[in-house]
Image: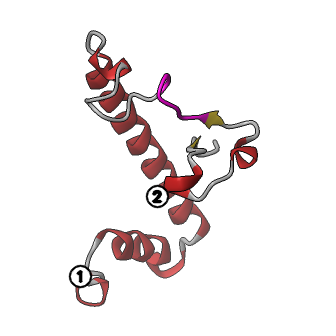
Amino acid sequence: MDLATGCYSDFDSTGVKGDNCADRVTHNRALNKDTAASRRSRTGDNFSHTVSGATAETSRQWNEFKAELRTTYPDNRRGEQMICALVHDDPASSCP
């Protein structure tokens, strides 16, 4: 599966031009639910649903990425070491 990403076409804050968002979901004031202060977030429990969905999707993507690292680099626990290095501040001392 591909990772899902949105496109923030606000050049002033992101440096991304609108034409770089072709075939991608564009975040704008009408669609945005990324902060509790946005208009859509204040409708019902949209914001809590957004947070729950984003958390679940991020967990799914992280788990798939870890599985790919383990599959791609099985020898000498290289995949496990890569995962360890990604999640520790001092991998040299934290990752065997």
User: Which color scheme did the rendering employ for the protein?
Assistant: secondary structure
Q: Quadrant of the C terminus?
A: bottom left
In the image, residue 29 lies in the stretch drawn in magenta: yes
Amino acid type, label 2? Lys
Rendered location of residue 92, percent (x, y): 30, 90
Amino acid type, label 1? Ser
Rendered location of residue 78, percent (x, y): 48, 78
Front position in the image: 7 or 54: 7
**Bounds of the magenta segment:** 26-31
Outermost residue, bottom direction?
92
In the image, residue 36 lies in the stretch drawn in magenta: no
Tag shown at residue 8: none
- Say which residue appears at 40% left-offset and 68% top-offset: 83
Left of 46 or right of it: where is 14?
A: right
Residue bearing mark 2: 66
Residue bearing mark 1: 94
Determine crowd level at label 2: few under 14, some 14-19, many 20+ residues with C-alpha closer than 10 A: some
